[in-house]
Amino acid sequence: MNPNTQLSSGNSVSLKQKVLPVWNQLGMLIILILLCIIMAIFAPYFTEVNNVLNILKQSSITAILAAGMTVVILTGGIDLSVGSTLALSGVISVMLSNAGFPPLLAMLAGIGTGYLAGVINGYFTAVTKLPAFVVTLGSMTYLRGIAFVISGGLPLVLKNKFFIFFGAGSILGIPTPIYIMMVVYVIMFFVLKYTMFGRHVYAIGGNEEAARLTGIKVEKTLINVYSISGLMAGIAGVVMAGRVISGQPNAGVSFELDAIAAVILGGTSFVGGVGRIQGTIIGVLIMAVLSNGLTLLNVDFYWQMIVKGLVIVIAVLLDKLRN
Amino acid sequence: MSSAVDSQLYRTSKEDRSKEIILSMEAIHKSFSGVQVLRNINLELHKGEVHALMGENGAGKSTLMKIMAGIYRPDSGRIIYKGEEMVWHNPLEARGKGISVIHQEISLSPNLTIGENILMGTKFPKNKLGLVQWDEIFKKTKIVLESIGSDLNPKLRVSELSVAQQQIVEIARALSFNSEVLIMDEPTASLTDKEIDKLFVIINDLREKGVAIVYISHRMDEIFKISDRCTILRDGQWISSHPIAETNPEQLVKQMVGRDLNDLFQKKFSPPVTPQGEPVLELIDVCDKGIVKNISLKIYPGEIVGLAGLVGAGRTELIRAIFGISKMTSGVIKLNGKPVNIKSPIEAMKHGIAHVPESRKEQGLFPNLSVKENMIMNQMHLYRKGGVLQYASMNAEIDKYMKDLGVRAASTEQNVMGLSGGNQQKIVIARWLSIGPKVLLLDEPTRGVDVGAKTEIHKIICELAEKGLAVLMVSSELPEILGVSDRILVMHEGKLKAELSKEEATQEKIMYFATGEIKK
């Protein structure tokens, strides 16, 4: 009818076509950047180097847990036990270190404990085919119980300097946990993109039945998936012990929920098969920037909880609208 | 004297009743995403009749019934029920007016009692406090059950019942809505002969009460035993309707299958009529714990064997047993003359068996991955260097398959869900060719694929056979079976009923054996 209306409708289509892929790729990164800009404007201290390092340091534990959680959620599963695993790994490594074992060995034992806890989760999920939610809800409880039993319920003060360095030290002015977090993410990126295991994770998450019929060893892959999550929780537990200079049986309570929130914020779908590790680190940082910035702005802690909760729901809603 | 009058009265009233139209469907059209599944269908349903609805797999029977029951809405056409034009907005509305469906899959809640299941969807009797009156539920449902001659205790849990008893509960539920039209979709599929007889007594009883029953079944003997009239559909079109007394099984089969074969692909090259050497795949008395019973067959190199039969005949189950997805309970599988014990798809693959499954979306594709990864998923281990995947080194192999199979995609990095059904199917086939198989098991290789791509896939299958592959192809499309196969096996209720050579096979013959011959 009117050439002008045609022209404008044509434009809007091409605009949509241009904007959508960019949003799909970078949506959450844009939100993170916007969030940083807003914080920088209203809370000038936000951009100080010390504050930035503080944000990264504080988010490192959640980030390491979330890296493992990403792999689990990519297969369509869930791991609720990572907070408890973190506590048990911390307690065991501190006990061994205080008992005179070489610090490196004590730390490896703590990490190994996490790995083992993951293997058990994986076995029950993959081989006996129990729902991951139930299996890890159970291990969340018994692992925490074990941590209390062996520690006698009390925090164990960590004495070894080398061990403490891994959680509380710094290299070239940057806290050690940040390095550990970066190494973990580089490795996980590589594993998911460039190993057969990684691609099988996506295949199983996308279509488990097809994966089975295609000859993928689904059980073995799933056991490895939960083992990786346990391993990450073990690493996080050791770093945490170093940072707070003690092994605490009640460490990491509800950390699994922070990790899950970060993964979901990062665009990984609960259904499985969709998501990237880069998204997860952005999700972790959004949560960290939010709580740091709100604190700087003197927002009451209780209000912070309300804001964070709403951010999670809105982020997932945006994600759904996108699809 | 008076009794003679009575019987005469009864007869006339019965005849009157049988001419009274309770429901008619006029010029019904329906298409799904551009594919026309029903074209100009007319159906008249009389009060107090059993009306058999017949046709091959995919003829449109289920779709038509779903329209009648308000599950789908027709694109055009009218439904006239008790003289009034009706537009169903949902199945509840149709059920409220007296049209009920008993689906092929039983849809009861296994952990609830029979009584609750029967009254599900109605208001439970309540006392003054608004609490459920259990006595009333069981009393009410007992009456319904007794009305169809069943002595089942309504307090039993459905999970404790046999399939036949569950079916009775389904019927009772349908009747508790005061149904005047009852649609039964293959109600005898999982019943024993004795249970079928019982069901027929109930159906007869309902007919006497004036209920109109639409009876969908593939079993010829049942149709002739129970129904009054029949309607035949083929490829979404109405073919004929007539009283069952005026027809015979041969005529019905002819009307169900009579389709033109001219425009479909025909295999040109054939292996020698008397196969040479050793069979690649041999089955001896293979059974599974479900439907498959004592299947023996041989497939020679370069041969395409078509496995025909109706849905539920056990063809897919047989394929799954060969590929190690389900367990064999007895029997032997031999590959190149040697017995093998295949317990999983991984082992089947190692023995050189490839399997293109029945449903692409649910069993074949990885929806979030690229064309490339979907193709290479079986053979990823070949493209690693020190555990690291070398994506670039896959390209040569991928390009070869893209070209050989004529896959049309913008890029191999494209998401696989963006492609057409035909191209997706080619990708699944390519994935299996990459293992260099000796035996190719195809389950409905062209389902949901457009005509052009169908022909291309048929060509691919034939070329593969020419290169020496042994192919076992399940298909519900008779023209496909006839066009591509060198030899045709027909299954019915888990057993092999016939083996036909390419020359002797016709649609009628296959259908005759697939419907289980006629018990005379």
Image (cartoon, coloured by chain):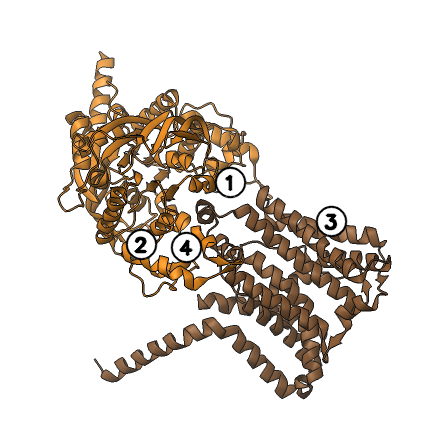
User: Which chain is displayed in orange in the rendered image?
Assistant: B
Asked if one can make out residue B187 in the rendered structure from this viewpoint, the answer is no
Q: Distance between the residues labelled 3 and 4?
A: 42 Å
Mark 3 and mark 2 in contact? Answer it, CB < 8 Å: no
Give percent across and percent down for residue A147. 78, 54
Q: Mark 4 points at which residue?
A: B376
Q: How far apart are marks 2 and 1 (CA)?
A: 47 Å
Total numbered badges shown on the rendered structure: 4
Q: Mark 1 points at which residue?
A: B124
- To the question of a shared chain for discs 3 and 1, the answer is no
Check disc 4: other Cα within 10 Å, few if <14, some if 14-19, many if 20+: many
Q: Tag 4, which secondary structure?
A: helix
Viewer-proximal residue among A112 and B273:
B273
Which three-letter amino acid code belongs to the residue tagged 1?
Answer: Phe
Residue found farthest to the top: B1
Q: Mark 2 points at which residue?
A: B421
Q: Which of marks 1 and 4 is in front?
A: 4
Q: Mark 3 points at which residue?
A: A142
Chain letter belonging to callout 3: A
Give percent across and percent down for residue B155. 54, 30
Which three-letter amino acid code belongs to the residue tagged 4?
Answer: Ile
- To the question of a shared chain for discs 2 and 1, the answer is yes
Residue at 51 percent across and 67 percent down: it is A317
Chain letter belonging to callout 1: B
Q: Which of marks 3 and 1 is in front?
A: 3
- A101 relative position to B514: left or right: right
| Picture quarter with the N terminus of chain A | bottom left
Which three-letter amino acid code belongs to the residue tagged 3?
Answer: Tyr
- To the question of a shared chain for discs 2 and 4, the answer is yes
